[in-house]
Image: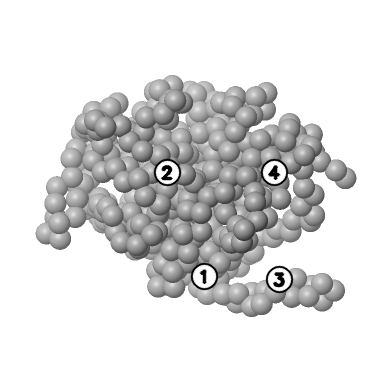
Amino acid sequence: AGAPLLPSPAKDFGWHDPGYIHSAVMTGLQPSQSYDYRYGSDSVGWSDTVKFRTPPAAGLDETSFVIYGDMGKAPLDPSVEHYIQPGSIAVTKAVAKEMQTGKVDSIFHIGDISYATGFLVEWDFFLHLIRPLASQVSYMTAIGNHERDYAGSGSVYVTPDSGGECGVAYESYFPMPAAGKDKPWYSIEQGSVHFIFMSTEHSWSEKSEQYNWMERDLSSVDRSRTPWVIFIGHRPMYSSNVGIIPSVDPDFVASVEPLLLTNKVDLVFFGHVHNYERTCAVYKGKCRGMPRKDASGIDTYDNSNYTAPVHAIVGAGGFSLDGFSLIPQSWSVSRISEFGYARVHATKTSVLVQFVSSGTTEIRDQFRIVKGGR
């Protein structure tokens, strides 16, 4: 029927008819089980059989996941497209290798997904890139500026970063269990963790629909079932990156950060800045708790006496890397400008986070948060 009513380039020279997009909700699946499946039809043919494993149920002792943001895509041949990002190939290959261990329950991609930005055929390229990952485990996403932002579209920020897509392509390709159309915030529980996914691109001001939802969701967590709360979004609250455009919006921090402290959020993951950075237990720019080395030499935060969340930027998923200021902030504990992803393992009493370099598969930073059972 032609392009929907979107701004340029999504509506004109970037338009590509995606054809039919099929989606289905699978019911009756059991947690922590492997299923064989295929897709297609007798008329057009069937795919090869693929094995998919479901994540663990809420309340179980442990879960493991991979998390990154800001990936993009790159061709495997000499073809030309805009925003070619070879780092995305290295990261997806490293994560695919990680999945072969059988220790990845879910993958979380937290904004700036494909960087198609109005050139809609590039979503096809990106989906092909992540097929070895998303076809085998749960692939959950958060929306970023390059999926949603455009002037006059209702986004908080009025940059043309989505290329006129305004979230339409993203919501078509990644239907999450969201609050509603163009309300891409939701929460899930796996193992010992309650995950809350927000949209930094939709209003987060006090009294907004999203703010009220976050307040209700965070205050209703059953800590006896899921002792850990992990908060996920795209734009960060803390970053040592120095650029022409500030990475941190102080209004966003002023509005949402108090919710994290009030509800004792343990760990926060953001992207947007293309590197890896870890903070102390921080609130309003001040360290309330520093890690100490455990017997294995791993930086360990003791949340038995909660003080504030630990923040981690994991925006090194493939798009061109960002650097850091020469003089680090007092709240910044670790800074790495390399492509990679975070590997996370959570039990009832500890969360271990390891930043893995996609180039070498070495652990470049790791930390643990611990507390007694509740």
Residue 220, quarter of the rendered image: top left
Residue 20, quarter of the rendered image: bottom right
Q: Which residue is mark 1?
A: 53
Which is nearer the N-term, disc 4 or disc 2?
4
**Callout 4, which amino acid?**
Phe
What is the CA distance from the residue labelled 4 to the residue labelled 2? Answer: 22 Å
Q: Which residue is mark 3?
A: 39
**Callout 2, which amino acid?**
Leu
Q: Is residue 213 visible?
A: no
Residue 19 percent coordinates (x, y): 80, 54
Q: Is 269 placed left or right of 374 in the picture?
A: right
Q: Is 366 placed left or right of 125 in the picture?
A: left
Q: Residues within 10 Å of mark 3 (few under 14, many from 20)?
A: few
Q: Which residue is mark 4?
A: 119
Q: Which residue is mark 2?
A: 321
**Callout 1, which amino acid?**
Arg
What is the CA distance from the residue labelled 1 to the residue labelled 2? Answer: 32 Å
Which is nearer the N-term, disc 1 or disc 2?
1
